[in-house]
Image (cartoon, rainbow, N blue to C red):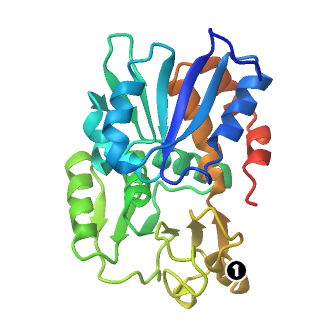
Amino acid sequence: MDIAGTTRVFLILGDPIAQVRAPEVFNHLFRRHGVDAVLVPAHVRSAEFDGFVRHALTARNIDGLWLAIPHKVGMVQLLDRCDTLARIAGAVNAARRNADGSIEGALFDGVGFVKALDQFGIAIGDARVLVAGVGGGGVAIAGSLASRGVGSLALFDATPGRATEVAQRLRAEFDVTIETPATSDPAGYDLVVNATPLGLKPGDALPFDVSRLVARTTVVDILMTRQPTPLLRACAERGISAHAGYEMLVQQIPEYLAFFGYDALARSVQADPSDVRALLQPR
């Protein structure tokens, strides 16, 4: 990749940063499609985040930021505006500097998830859906499901009061039935989503009792590491249809590209994401 004075620069900010794969994917796409742009990782600690962002976005050749953990939440207070789902979730995946100098953010986690369901052939119009875990990713997913018009939505979180708080925010925005069950019992749902961190560490308990799943239920585990996850393995042992979450990342790629103004490239990747899918296959 040739970098020149004309190159448009994007930064991905995280703490840590070594684990991110976005530079690999987007720089591959920029190079392959002849786009004069580069995505550079930057290890920025939370205490230095606000100052770094304010200064970075004054550079006229830095067009925007990708946000990795833990900065998806911290970026929101620095924005001039953001989309509805980002406002509900209190987090963004990306931020750009507009022509008028304003900073705008957007959240793609939920959009990517719903597009992944389309790829899996999972219809949600009349579905009863349980989302286990309503942290940043879970809220984004719940918000996108609500905006899409899911049959009914149940939210569970181990943190007391968290699910109720999120449900109230969603009800204020969307006309959808939302429940907050006291447990993560998956019995009777058409779609069950694991948006908890359970499964990241060896010895973690499963996020719910898979023996309670019925044959018609589909499970999606959004964890990206340790594939297949313990939950996916447990579902396979019981003959339950289950999907890994990395397709959610694949489906976010065109959203990022369109957000930053690369509409033609976004359409190309959306039409044929096989190249991106191969890059993002779980390792």
In terms of image quadrants, where is residue 246? bottom right
Query: Which image quarter: residue 28?
Result: top right
Which residue is at 80% across, 47% downward?
278
Which residue is at 58% across, 65% downward? Answer: 223
Q: Position of residue 251 (x, y in %)?
A: 61, 43
The furthest residue to the bottom: 211
Q: Position of residue 196 (x, y in %)?
A: 46, 70
The answer to whether any part of residue 201 appears in the image is yes
Whether residue 85 is visible, yes or no, is: no
Give the quadrant of the C terminus: bottom right
**In the rendered image, the vertical position of residue 52 relative to residue 219, given as above or below:** above
Give me the residue at 54% from left, 46% from top.
Answer: 112
Tell me the element at label 1.
helix
Count of residue discs: 1
The 10 Å Cα crowd at callout 1, few under 14, some 14 to 19, many 20 or more, is some
In the rendered image, which residue does mark 1 sit on? Answer: 233
| Image-based side of 182 in relation to 265, left or right | left
Residue 48 vertical placement versus 266 (above, below): below
- Which amino acid does the dot numbered 1 rest on? Arg
Residue 74 image position (x, y, % from top left):
32, 46
Please indicate whether residue 105 sits to the left or right of residue 109 in the image: left
Residue 232, given in percent of the width and then of the height, sits at 66, 75
Residue 259 lies, with reference to residue 147, above or below; the image says: above
Q: Is residue 175 left or right of residue 229?
A: left
Query: Which residue is at the front of the view, 176 or 163?
Result: 163
Quadrant (top left, top right, bottom left, bottom right) of the N terminus: top right
